[in-house]
Amino acid sequence: MNIQSAVSGGRLTAYLSGELDQHEARSAMQSLDELLDANLPRDLVLDLSALHFMDSSGIALMIRLSRRMKAMGGRMWIENPAQQPKRVMDAAGIDRLIPVAAGSL
């Protein structure tokens, strides 16, 4: 798993690529926590266009990040989920908790 990021106008966009599974989730969360601590964004966007595989560990990561952003007074959403992660997200009903968009909000 690889995480790239960009910051602009209080918005942190994290680009996740590769596979997000049980083995990768812990290090991904640590990396994302470090990005949040360093940037203190108002908005967090997870771009999943290059994430080819995700299991339920990815759902747990998204929920944890959403709760953290709410605690910081910010918001979070997911953009451009690839086909397989989208199926996992749909099965979990993540869109009832976190907005999911095909493009920018």
Image: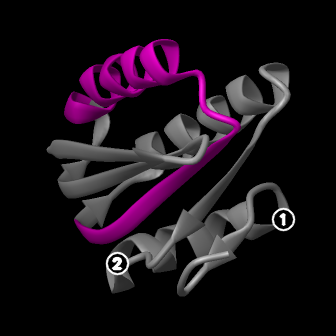
Q: In the image, is residue 45 above or below residue 7?
A: below
- Which image quarter: residue 82? bottom left
Q: CA distance from mark 1 to mark 2?
A: 19 Å
* Disc 2: which residue: 84
Helix, strand or loop for disc 2: helix
* Relative image position of residue 73 (x, y in whole percent): 85, 28
Q: In the image, is residue 21 above or below residue 84?
A: above
Please report the residue visible at 57 percent of the width from the left and 63 percent of the height from the top: 78
Residue 95 shows in the view: yes
* Relative image position of residue 69 (x, y in whole percent): 72, 31
- Which image quarter: residue 74? top right
Mark 2 is surrounded, within 10 Å at the Cα level, by few (under 14), some (14 to 19) or many (20 or more) other residues, namely some
Specify start and end residues of the magenta stretch as a single range: 23-51
Mark 1 is surrounded, within 10 Å at the Cα level, by few (under 14), some (14 to 19) or many (20 or more) other residues, namely few
Please report the residue visible at 84 percent of the width from the left and 65 percent of the height from the top: 96
**What is the number of the mark on residue 71?**
none
Q: In the image, is residue 1 above or below residue 35?
A: below
- In the foreground, 98 or 92: 98
Helix, strand or loop for disc 1: helix
Name the quadrant of the N terminus. Answer: top left
Q: Is residue 67 left or right of residue 58?
A: right
Q: Is residue 52 left or right of residue 104?
A: left
Please report the residue visible at 58 percent of the width from the left and 47 percent of the height from the top: 9
- In the foreground, 60 or 102: 102
Residue sitting farthest toward the front: 9
How many marks the image carries: the answer is 2
Please report the residue visible at 30 percent of the width from the left and 30 percent of the height from the top: 28
The amino acid at mark 2 is: Gln
* Relative image position of residue 57 (x, y in whole percent): 43, 40
* Relative image position of residue 42 (x, y in whole percent): 70, 37
* Disc 1: which residue: 96
The amino acid at mark 1 is: Arg
